C-alpha cells in the first residue's frame, strides 16, 4: 500500500480537524452569541446548538433549541417556552420550528390582557408560524359578561358549552356562538342583541386569529403569523 507523503498527511489531518473540530467549536460558542442578540438579549434563556460541517458550509446551524421561563418575545410574555428550530441561517431564516409554551400573555387585544395555556407552536420562516393555545373558561365567561354590560345588557351570566356559549339574562336563555370575523372574536347572541365583539386585536402583535374551538373548559384559539410578519416578532425584545 502506498504511504501518504507528509504534505498529503497534513492536508488530510487539517481536513479532519475542520470537519470534526469546527462544528464542535461552533456548537460551543454559538449559544453565548445567540443569548446576546435580540430578541433574547438580557433574558435567562437556555440555548443549545447542533452544527455539522455540511451545514456550516451552507451557512446554517443544524438545530437550535431555546428554552426558559419568564421570557419576552415581540411584546408577548412567556411563562415558559421550549422550542427547537432546524436549518437556522444567519438571516434568521429556519427550515422548521416546533415547540410548546405555557402562560403566554399578550396585550394584543388592547386593554384586555389574555393568557393562553398549553400552547403549541409550529412552522417555518418560509411558510409562517401557527400557534394554538387555550383561554380558560372563567376568563372567556367574564369577558362575555363584560361585553354584554358594555352593550347595555347588564346582569347577564355566561357558561361555555361544547361549541357554544349559554347566555342567561333577564330570565331568558340563549345558546350563542363565538366566531372569527375579520380577525376579531365575535359573539352572536341570537335575538338578544346584534353581534358583540369579545376580543379585537389592536395590531401590536403580528398575526391574526384564524379559528376557535369552544369547549366547557375553555376556548382554544388558533393564531397565524405570516412569513412577512416574522421580522416584527423576531426583532422585538
Image (tube, rainbow, N blue to C red):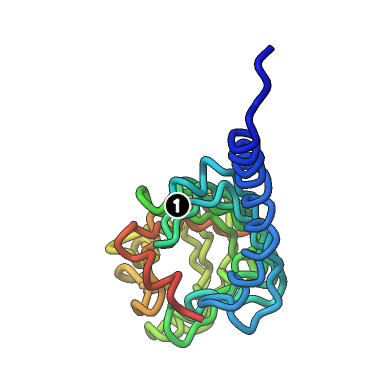
Left or right: 58, with 229 as reference point: right
Snapshot quadrant of residue 65: bottom right
The residue under the point 41% across, 74% down is 205
Total marks shown come to 1
The residue under the point 43% across, 75% down is 235
The residue under the point 65% across, 36% down is 6
The one nearer the camera, 14 or 118, is: 14
Snapshot quadrant of residue 142: bottom right
Vertical comparison of 30 with 96: above or below: below
The one nearer the camera, 80 or 215, is: 80
Across and down, in percent, residue 32 comes to: 66, 71
Furthest-front residue in view? 5
**Figure quadrant of the N terminus:** top right
List the residue tagged with mark 1.
59
Across and down, in percent, residue 124 comes to: 44, 49
Across and down, in percent, residue 143 comes to: 52, 76
Q: Residues within 10 Å of mark 1 (few under 14, many from 20)?
A: some
Across and down, in percent, residue 132 comes to: 53, 54
The residue under the point 37% across, 83% down is 151
Residue 87 in sight in this render: yes
Left or right: 193, with 70 as reference point: left
Residue 216 in sight in this render: no
Snapshot quadrant of residue 49: bottom right
Furthest-top residue in view? 1
The one nearer the camera, 175 or 104, is: 104
Vertical comparison of 29 with 59: above or below: below
| Element at label 1 | loop
Amino acid at each position: 500500500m502506498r504511504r501518504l507523503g507528509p504534505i498529503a498527511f497534513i492536508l488530510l489531518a487539517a481536513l479532519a480537524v475542520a470537519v470534526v473540530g469546527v462544528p464542535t467549536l461552533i456548537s460551543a460558542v454559538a449559544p453565548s452569541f445567540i443569548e446576546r442578540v435580540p430578541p433574547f438579549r438580557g433574558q435567562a434563556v437556555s440555548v443549545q446548538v447542533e452544527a455539522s460541517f455540511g451545514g456550516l458550509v451552507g451557512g446554517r446551524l443544524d438545530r437550535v433549541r431555546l428554552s426558559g421561563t419568564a421570557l419576552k418575545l415581540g411584546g408577548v410574555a412567556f411563562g415558559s417556552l421550549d422550542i427547537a428550530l432546524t436549518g437556522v441561517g444567519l438571516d434568521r431564516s429556519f427550515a422548521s420550528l416546533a415547540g410548546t409554551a405555557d402562560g403566554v400573555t399578550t396585550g394584543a387585544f388592547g386593554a384586555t390582557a389574555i393568557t393562553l395555556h398549553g400552547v403549541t407552536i409550529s412552522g417555518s420562516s418560509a411558510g409562517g408560524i401557527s400557534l394554538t393555545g387555550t383561554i380558560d373558561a372563567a376568563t372567556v365567561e367574564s369577558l362575555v359578561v363584560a361585553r354584554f354590560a358594555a352593550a347595555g345588557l347588564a346582569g347577564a351570566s355566561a357558561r361555555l358549552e361544547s361549541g357554544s356559549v349559554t347566555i342567561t339574562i333577564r330570565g331568558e336563555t340563549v345558546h350563542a356562538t363565538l366566531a372569527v370575523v375579520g380577525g376579531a372574536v365575535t359573539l352572536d347572541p341570537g335575538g338578544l342583541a346584534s353581534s358583540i365583539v369579545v376580543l379585537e386585536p389592536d395590531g401590536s402583535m403580528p398575526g391574526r386569529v384564524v379559528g376557535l374551538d369552544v369547549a366547557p373548559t375553555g376556548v382554544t384559539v388558533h393564531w397565524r403569523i405570516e412569513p412577512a410578519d416574522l421580522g416584527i416578532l423576531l426583532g422585538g425584545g
